Each structure stands twice: as C-alpha cells, then as structure tokens.
Amino acid sequence: MDVTPFTSTPAISQSVSTPKISSDYETFLKMLTTQMQNQDPLNPIDSADYAVQLATFSGVEQAVRTNQLLEAMQSQFDVLGMAQLAGWVGQEARSAAPVFLDGAPVTVSLKPAASADRAVLVVRDAAGTIVSREDVPLGEDQYEWLGADIRGDPLQHATYTLSLESYFQGDMLSTGPVESYAQILEARGGVGGTKLLLRGGVEVSASSVTALRVP
C-alpha cells in the first residue's frame, strides 16, 4: 500500500493536570505526620517503616502520572492517524469488505490457488444466499465484475459478499474472500480504531485496507 509516511511527530505536551494526585499526596503527608505525633514514645516506629511508606506512595504517584501521560500521547497519536487518513478520502481502497453494487462494474482482486486450472467467483446476497457463480480468468490479478446473476441478468442494486473457489481437475483446492475496490467517503475514529466509510455505506477497518488507488 503506497502511503506517504510521516517524518515527524507533533510535540506532545507533558503538562498533565494532577489536582487529585496533589490532594492525595497532601492527605498522605498529614496522615503520616499524625502517625508520628501519636506514636508510642516507649515504642517508636522505626524510621525505615516511614521510608517504605513514602517510597510506596511515591511509586503509586509515578504510576498514575505515567498512565495520564500515556493517555495524552494516545490522544495525540489518534489525531495524527486521522490527519494521515484525511488524504485517503476520495481515493479507492482495496479490502475484503462486502461489495456495494449500483450498476457500475466493480474491480475485484483475484488470487486463485497457484495450481488451479479453474476459478469461480461466488456471489452471496445479504442473507448469505448464492445468487451467482461465475468462471473468471486465471492469471489476471484484477477483474471487472459486472454484477450479473446466475442467468446473466443484472443483479439488484445492493450489497454482496464475494468469494473465490479454486479448482484443479474438478476438485476444489481452496475458497476464500475476494478483495475489491470502493471509494472512501469518510474516516471515523472510535474505541475500536479508525473505520472507513465506503461507497454504499459499507464500513471497514483502516487496518484491513491492502491498497489505495486514485479513481
């Protein structure tokens, strides 16, 4: 996939707001002071115990600060990723997502088994029913699928799932999903990662895109 890499990363602010940490630390010091003031004079607490308490709280404080800094960094990286993906909008992405058919030919990527002597493009509708089986040429990486049913009539405008069956001397060798090209309309960020909205309302993860091209 030919995507121009970024050579620099925006500066990430490390001024993380920590009012709660400061409040907790002050409370801890007050409790420690009270503990020292009210200890038994005849059986004072070992100074090493105070050192352990201070070290323990300091470790917790540093861990919380680290987590906050990582969250801030992740936010910056998300923005960086969206800025990079902004250049994808309008281009055509190749992925194994379902295909939206509206009457125009769809460019699909064919990868039959190396030893296959026959390849069949299988088309299923949204319910999973096979609506077309079409022999496709071997040795061609890209194929223009016209969207016809088993009888050769145009399929209805809808979303379909494509798969490719590879045969050798009548025996099926393998079957697998087929990648196709579709125009990117929008890039969306979310908890599950960046999603791309393709033409026809098909949504696909940005990480599953294997190629880009200019329409």
Image (cartoon, rainbow, N blue to C red):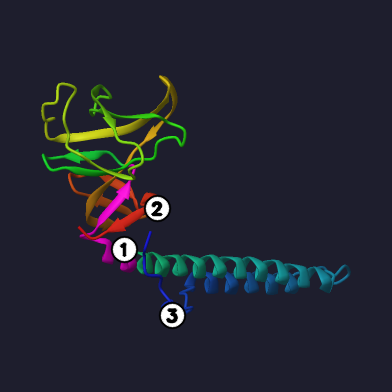
Asked where in the image residue 123 lies, by quadrant, the reply is top left
Based on the picture, tell me whether residue 118 belongs to the magenta stretch: no
Reply above or below: 112 against 185.
Answer: above
Q: Residue at x 64, y 74 (%)?
A: 29
Q: Is residue 190 visible?
A: no
Q: Which residue is mark 2?
A: 207
Q: Is residue 161 visible?
A: yes
C-alpha separation, residue under disc 3 versus residue under disc 2: 25 Å
N-terminal label among 1 and 2: 1
Q: Which residue is mark 1?
A: 85
C-alpha separation, residue under disc 3 versus residue under disc 1: 19 Å
Reply above or below: 184 against 200.
Answer: below
Asked where in the image residue 130 lies, by quadrant, the reply is top left
Q: Nearer the viewer, residue 187 or 140?
A: 140
- Give the magenta range: 82-96
N-terminal label among 3 and 1: 3
The image position of residue 129, as x and y in percent, is 25, 22
Amino acid type of the residue tagged 1 in the rendering = Leu
Residue 11, label in figure:
3
N-terminal label among 3 and 2: 3
The image position of residue 179, as x and y in percent, is 33, 43
The image position of residue 82, as x and y in percent, is 32, 64
The image position of residue 46, as x and y in percent, is 85, 70
Asked where in the image residue 138 lies, by quadrant, the reply is top left
